[in-house]
Amino acid sequence: MSLGGRIKQASAQLAKPLNSTESVVVRRHRPDYLIVLYMGLLMLLGLIIMYAIGPQRANVLNNAYGSDYSDSYFFIKQTISLVLALAAFWAMAYFPYKWVLKYAGKILIIALLACVLLAIAGWLDLGIAQKSLGATRWFNLGPLGSLQPAEFLKFGILVFLAGFFGMKARQGKINDVQATLIPLAVLTAISMLFIIIIQKDMGTGIAIAGTIITMLFVAGINNRMLIIVALALLGVGIIFILMAPHRIDRIVTYLKGDSTSVDDAGAYHIEHAKIAIGTGGLFGVGIGNSVQATGYLPEAINDSVFAIMGETFGFVGLVTILVLFVALMMRLLKLMDHLVEMRLKLLVAGVFGWFGSHVILNVAAMLGIFPLTGITLPLLSFGGTSMIFIAAALGLVFQLSRFTVHTSRLKEAHNENSSSRRGVGRTRYSGSRSSSRA
């Protein structure tokens, strides 16, 4: 069966319960507002840093390329992106998740077609394909900004695989090579073709791989198969690295460590990221006083924003940011543990893998622990498409937090009144008392 046929087959199964226990519809209750709190605080910090370093970034670009960016350009764009991200969060928080799952196959196909269209536009050198630093990753939408289809593809893969793996778990075929792993390999290969080879975006490819591995683990794949899949993805990653000289240079730079000459672009980037973090000291140099943002540190508002925040807010500020990230990811894990249906668990697991991959890779690269990958820091880096789709994924998670049950109630899920829409006050997994109130 073709990939398109398998996508349609999986989509048709998304609304079906995965087993007799999961056939019960859990009563809707109050959602987990801590997800909104942590996400909002991170967004606010991102907006503050754009306000602080936006004028410096505009000045650097104006001097280097003769552009005419105003001092408030990046702050205004980030504000617009934040508003759109909040709208995406709200839409996914209240639009029925069953509809999203039902049409997951179509969402994935549209995302793949967007990548195909971008590739064609790039080959034909059309104005709609925006090129930057030798890569074609964005649609140029004129006054509306740009759109990166890779972020849409992440979302499409997330919702589709939740249904696909859920269906295979229901059938007892999650470890079946022909029924599960081969279709997964085909989908992954097609995605990596567009993301890593055509769009030259290794960081996004790694994030997709992290999402897939996390979902497979939660779906119940056995350790042997999981190791095989992980090694296969690692092998493919090594091949992609060897195909691109600049990726080889980044690995060599990383392996040489501090002995690398700063004349090397990668070493220069890492060196100045460390300088930024070190300069910040305990409490930072303060808003608007960053030196590295004046042109020394590449991609100061994008991939390197963590280092700039270290310079601005210091060690205490970076610890606070990391605590917010960890707190948000812990809420995702706790939510996943208290969902009844496997497909919903997989959705949350995928968001955890997606979000966590970005955070770990970005922070590790800025600290010199991992090679540079060119990956954004979720909700903080400048870039609307990334923020919008991550917010949409978190909105979907927020909606699912309405359908959790307390640990002590999991065995009583059959007795839930699925027709009731009455709220029960506190979120079901917020504490032991919530179970007595339910």
Image (cartoon, helix red, strand yellow):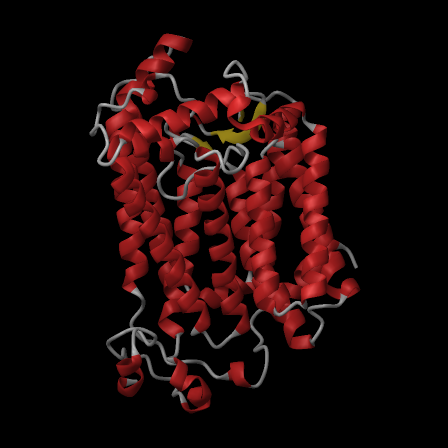
Coordinates of residue 18 in the picture (x, y in percent): 59, 77
Q: Residue at x 58, y 48 (%)?
A: 208
Up-down: is 190 above or below 411?
Answer: above
Instruction: Check the picture and name the quadrant holding the C terminus.
Output: bottom left
Instruction: Check the picture and name the quadrant holding the N terminus.
Output: bottom right
In the image, 370 versus 77, the foreground residue is: 370
Q: How many marks?
A: 0
Q: Residue at x 26, y 85 (%)?
A: 437
Q: Quadrant of residue 385?
A: top left
In the image, 269 versus 23, the foreground residue is: 269
In the image, 157 versus 5, the foreground residue is: 157
Q: Residue at x 45, y 72 (%)?
A: 337
Q: Quadrant of residue 160?
A: bottom right
- Kindly tell me whether residue 152 is visible in this rendering: yes
Up-down: is 265 above or below 286?
Answer: above
Q: Residue at x 44, y 32 (%)?
A: 303
Coordinates of residue 207 in the picture (x, y in percent): 55, 46
Coordinates of residue 155 in the picture (x, y in percent): 52, 51
Residue lying farthest to the front in this orientation: 259
- Kindly tell me whether residue 106 is visible in this rendering: no
Residue lying farthest to the bottom in this orientation: 415
In the image, 110 versus 219, the foreground residue is: 219
Coordinates of residue 358 in the picture (x, y in percent): 47, 44
